[in-house]
Amino acid sequence: MSAADPNRLTAYHEAGHAVIALAEGRAIQEVSILPGPQRLGHCQVKKGAGRKLKDSLETDLLILLAGIAAEVRLTGRYNLRGAAQDLQMAQKLASLRAPNERQGQRLLERTLAKVEHLLADDATWRAVEAVAAELLVSQRISGRAARHFYELAMAK
């Protein structure tokens, strides 16, 4: 299975969302690579669950950008079309914090760099790989399973 395999890309994309959400203290409901009418997969974050966040807007941006960051780590290329929905939502969130479009874009660039740095950590990347591998087998996993793979990777 090549890095360009669409299912593999989707698995890494969704695993990126899940692992960064868990790393940032959010709980996951479900992660799936089963296609829907408007997306190839999804990572459902539990609302209001997890530890109190220092900056919930930044956390939301990190989670949104984690999919494209995981894909670029895997392939070396940004899949802007595949992450269009995430990027659109991230731009809307950035506009809540930044006083103008230029500063909003800079905020997104800084946040993307931060999430790429987080994914460069060996244990974090092992967690992404483990969640993606399970998604390729099962196509859908529970938040509990995602947390299990995350905790195993962090313990090594």
Image (tube, rainbow, N blue to C red):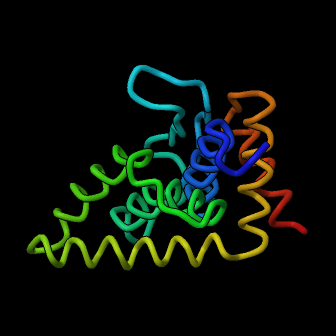
Q: Which of 145/17 is in front? A: 17
Which residue lies at the image location 51% right of the left edge and 46% below the top edge?
49
Q: Which of 110/151 is in front? A: 110
Q: Which of 73/43 is in front? A: 73
Which residue lies at the image location 79% right of the left edge and 42% below the top edge?
1
Tell me the quarter of the image containing the C terminus.
bottom right
The x and y percentages for residue 64 are: 43, 54
Decide: is 135 above or below 65.
above
The x and y percentages for residue 18 are: 60, 49
The reply, left or right, for residue 39 in relation to residue 147 is left
Number of numbered labels in the structure image: 0
Which residue lies at the image location 58% right of the left edge and 57% below the top edge?
71
Name the outermost residue toward the top.
Answer: 37
Name the outermost residue toward the left.
Answer: 100
The x and y percentages for residue 119 are: 63, 70
**Which quadrant holds residue 87?**
bottom left
**Which quadrant holds residue 75?**
bottom right
The x and y percentages for residue 128 are: 71, 56
The reply, left or right, for residue 33 in relation to residue 90 is right
